[in-house]
Structure formats: structure tokens, C-alpha cells
């Protein structure tokens, strides 16, 4: 899988959670749909707009893993059942700010993902806790202040950065490549960051 960065991830206006991923030339990379009314988180990834060609499935391990988001592992598989890897939440640290491990098919650590400014989420939570006025201020906060996430490789070197874009109605994210990566990592990085965006879309 060859990806032309930067990538754009945008949520569609829909009753259900659905997003599109496009590359630097505007070419469709994936359409992602989150399954609703399911005990555990489940995501389906398609290659086409009509969602006829499913390429991957992503599912939280365990029957109540979706509820225990702060410790859940979300496994990524191709449609033939072959493992691509997993996004592993880092326990209680995820309650403070985004903190995940991106594991390869052998369950070895390939990347870590961190919220660059986790304290912004704390400030937003405090603002939103104020009745009525807090909700209005929090909406302005969401528009003016948006989080960024850094993806580092197993040696701790930054490899990618995810920016949440300023927007009133939609949720948009941009993924930039900080240095040339290995082509074999593209599939894992793309699908891992799709999961990141689904988990973190309400922050900021």
C-alpha cells in the first residue's frame, strides 16, 4: 500500500459513524463505517464509495472491550483473516490523554501514539462542567483549540503527526508524514490512525 501524504480523514454527515480517507491528490483511500448496536466496537473498511468491496475488519477484543475503552485492544485483520496488527490503549493513561501502542501482526511494538497537549482536554472538561454557559464556551473552545497527536516509531523517533482541523460542524483530521517510512508499515499506520480518530474525535 503506497500512501501519498498528507492524508485527509473526514467524518460524513450521517446518522451513523462513517468517514472517508483521501490522499494528497484527493484520491479515495478508504471508506470506514462503524457498526452500530454492537456489544463491542466493530469497524468495517471499504475500498469504494458504494461499500461493495470490504478490505479490512477492526474489532475490539473481548465482549465488553468497547465499554472498557481505557484498556481495550482493537485488532485489525484483512478479509482473508490475516492479522495486520492492533491498536492497544495504554490503560489509565488514556483517561488523561490519547496514549496508545500500535502493534504489528506479531504483537511486537511498531509505533506509539501520544496526545501532544493532553492538558487541553482537562481544561475543556472543566469548562464544559459549568451549566449552560460552560456548554457555549466549550463549543468555542472546540473550534479554536484542536489537538495534535504524534506517532513515534519503536525507537522513539517521530514518524507521523495527526492534526484535528478547525471546523464548526464536521470532524476533519490531517495526517502528515514527518520522515520517509517503510512501505510495509503503511497499511498498519493508516488503519491504526483511523481507530485513533474514531476514539478521539470528541476531544477538542
Image: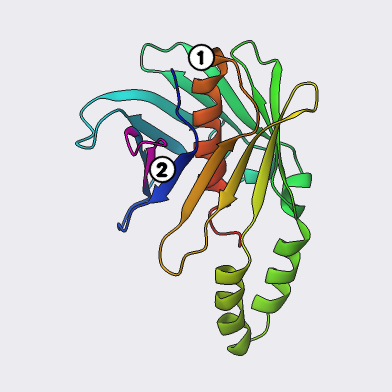
Q: Please, what secondary structure does the residue beneath circle 1 have?
A: strand
Give x and y (percent) for residue 158. 73, 32
Image quadrant for the N terminus? top left
Near-viewer residue (171 or 85): 171
Residue 150, position as x, y percentages in the image: 69, 40
Q: Which mark is residue 194?
A: none
Residue 98 placed where, x, y %?
69, 47
Residue ID for mark 2: 38
Q: Can residue 60 be seen at all in this image of the molecule? A: no
Q: Position of residue 191 (x, y in %)?
A: 49, 30
126 displayed left or right of 5: right
Residue pointed to by mark 1: 83
Residue nearest the observer in this picture, 30 or 33? 30
Observer-nearest of 168 and 94: 168
Determine the CA span between mark 2 and mark 1: 22 Å
Determine whether 92 is above or below 182 in the image.
below
Quick check: is 197 in the magenta stretch? no
Which residue corresponds to the image point at 69% horizontal and 26% vertical from the top-left? 111
Left or right: 42, with 124 as reference point: left
Q: Residue at x 55, y 59 (%)?
A: 202
Please identify the quarter of the rendering in which residue 171 is found.
Answer: bottom left
Magenta residue span: 19-28
Crowd class of label 1 (few under 14; some 14 to 19; many from 20; radius 10 Å): some
Q: How many marks?
A: 2
Which quadrant of the rendered structure holds the C terminus? bottom right
Amino acid at each position: 500500500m503506497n500512501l501519498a501524504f498528507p492524508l485527509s480523514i473526514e467524518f460524513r454527515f450521517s446518522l451513523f459513524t462513517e468517514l472517508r480517507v483521501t490522499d494528497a491528490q484527493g484520491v479515495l483511500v478508504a471508506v470506514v463505517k462503524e457498526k452500530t448496536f454492537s456489544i463491542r466496537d466493530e469497524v468495517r473498511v471499504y475500498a469504494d464509495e458504494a461499500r461493495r468491496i470490504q478490505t479490512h475488519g477492526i474489532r475490539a477484543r473481548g465482549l465488553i472491550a468497547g465499554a472498557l475503552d481505557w484498556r481495550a485492544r482493537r485488532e485489525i485483520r484483512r478479509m482473508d483473516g490475516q492479522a495486520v496488527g492492533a491498536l492497544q490503549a495504554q490503560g489509565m493513561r488514556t483517561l488523561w490523554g490519547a496514549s496508545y501502542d500500535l502493534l504489528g501482526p506479531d504483537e511486537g511494538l511498531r509505533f506509539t501514539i501520544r496526545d501532544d497537549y493532553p492538558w487541553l482536554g482537562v481544561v475543556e472538561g472543566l469548562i464544559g462542567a459549568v451549566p449552560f454557559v460552560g456548554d457555549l464556551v466549550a463549543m468555542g473552545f472546540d473550534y479554536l483549540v484542536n489537538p495534535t497527536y504524534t506517532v513515534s516509531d519503536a525507537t522513539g523517533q517521530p514518524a507521523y503527526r495527526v492534526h484535528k482541523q478547525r471546523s464548526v460542524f464536521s470532524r476533519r483530521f490531517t495526517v502528515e508524514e514527518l520522515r520517509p517510512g517503510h512501505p510495509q508499515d503503511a497499511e498498519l499506520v493508516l488503519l491504526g490512525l483511523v481507530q485513533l480518530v474514531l476514539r478521539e474525535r470528541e476531544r477538542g
